[in-house]
Amino acid sequence: MLNGVLLLAEAVLYFGAMVTLFRFRARIGLGVFVCALGVMHFLETYLASVFYVQLPFGMVSPGSAVMFSGKLVMLLLLYMKEDAATVRQPIYGLLLGNALMIGLVLVLRLHTISPLPDGKVPDIGFIDEMGWLMVWGTTLLFIDAILIILLYEKLGAYLRHLPFARIFASVACVLTFDQIGFFTALHFVAGAPIAVFFGGWFAKMGAALAYSGMLVAYLKWVEDHDVAVPRGLSDIFDTLTYRERYEALIKYVGRDGLTGLLHRGSFDADGESAVAAAINIGKPLSLLIVDVDHFKSINDRFGHAEGDKVLKSTAAMLAETVGGSDQVFRIGGEEFAILTQQPHASARLLGESIRNAAKTSAHTGRYDITVSAGVSTVSETTRCLADIFALADQRLYKAKSSGRDRVVGEPGGEAITRGVSPKTA
């Protein structure tokens, strides 16, 4: 009787501690919950191999009946409130961690071991036994997690309005499968008697009943009622997290959300400062306005998602092509601007490099990407940002109206070269 009460108390303690960590995942991070789940993996495997208590229906291990059953329910909770991609993370982590442990033990065997003063030496055989049991148990857990998700979803068609029955049926079926698989390994590795199988199965069914009831209560009365969590005492990780977010915010202030380039507001502010500095110190400053040709037809034919890909790839190409001291901006839908500390002739050559790079960096089988560009430079007649922008924009218009896929940098609107326009045009 006492053993049964203790097992139930252990289950309540395990469940309460784990769901508390899960409940506050938005505050302390989901990783705390996942790590706690992983730390218990070794203990539950160890207990399942050596620690048993007698109950009326057979021998039972708390490691298997309480801890493993609880872990499976926690993975189901993780799936229900997060997603399957999150569930796989602790499982893959355990698989790789166990494999690493076995690999390191194989290397450790090569050491010449020095005994401690009291004569103690490491039990490598115990580590071997535990390592292989943990690998087998984690492999089963991988299968268990897939099965319980599939079962839970499949039963949703019949038991959607009966959450307890849905959860209990899913957990009980998977625990039965796991008991067969783990006992097989336990029997051959640790010599566990058949009484362990039947006692463990009955105990797991009881665990499935208890955990299902606690999970339904938690979901109904706790998880589904969002409560504002006050910010408590911060620790070093809070400090580092907020500092990292602050630095990231500073880094991306003034940037376009889609492409990551500086946006139009930054162009207006930085451009005015750059023109004034160029005039004051007598150094060249040129502006290139680059426009993606036939961009509207790409949106119309292939959708805005495809158009966004073109803008991102164009932005990446521009950032890669221009010099480190040059600034690249997205100033409109498919229009980009580049401020470069180069004289006019060099800026025109930069425009040609961009035009050629566009054809290879964003090529697809359905259409070709080309760009047109207008170039202007600070001079006696263009002594503010508005002047050089108006002139570059005028030359861009000439490049577009005279055939596209060209760079115009002279008053007459001459294009240096002309390529192939998009297949969709």
Image: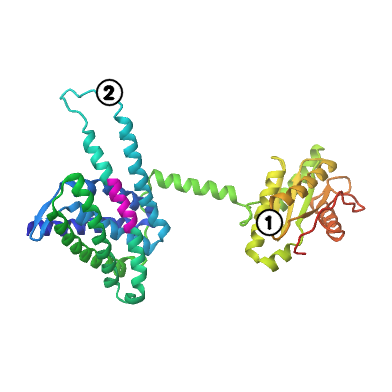
The color scheme shown is rainbow
Left or right: where does residue 52 sit relative to residue 249? left
Q: Residue at x 28, y 62 (%)?
A: 174
Q: Secondary structure at mark 1?
A: loop
Magenta stretch: residue 329 in it? no
Check disc 1 and report the residue beneath it: 364
Q: Is residue 97 above or below residue 5?
A: above
Q: Is residue 266 visible?
A: no
Among the two numbered marks 2 and 1 on one chain, the one whose residue lies closer to the N terminus: 2
Q: Position of residue 285 (x, y in %)?
A: 79, 43
Residue segment shown in magenta: 134-144
Q: Residues within 10 Å of mark 2 (few under 14, many from 20)?
A: few
Image quadrant of residue 146?
A: bottom left
User: Which quadrant: the N terminus?
Assistant: bottom left
Q: Position of residue 117 (x, y in %)?
A: 17, 22
| Residue type pointed to by label 1 | Thr
What distance separates the C-alpha of mark 2 from that of mark 1? 60 Å
User: Residue 28, image x and y in percent?
Assistant: 37, 52
Q: According to the image, label 2 marks what residue?
A: 112
Residue 385 on image: x %, y %: 79, 51
Q: In the rendered structure, are the residues bearing label 2 and label 1 in contact, judged by CB atoms less than 8 Å apart?
A: no
Residue 143, magenta (yes or no): yes
What secondary structure is the magenta-colored segment mainly?
A: helix
Which quarter of the figure is the C terminus placed in? bottom right
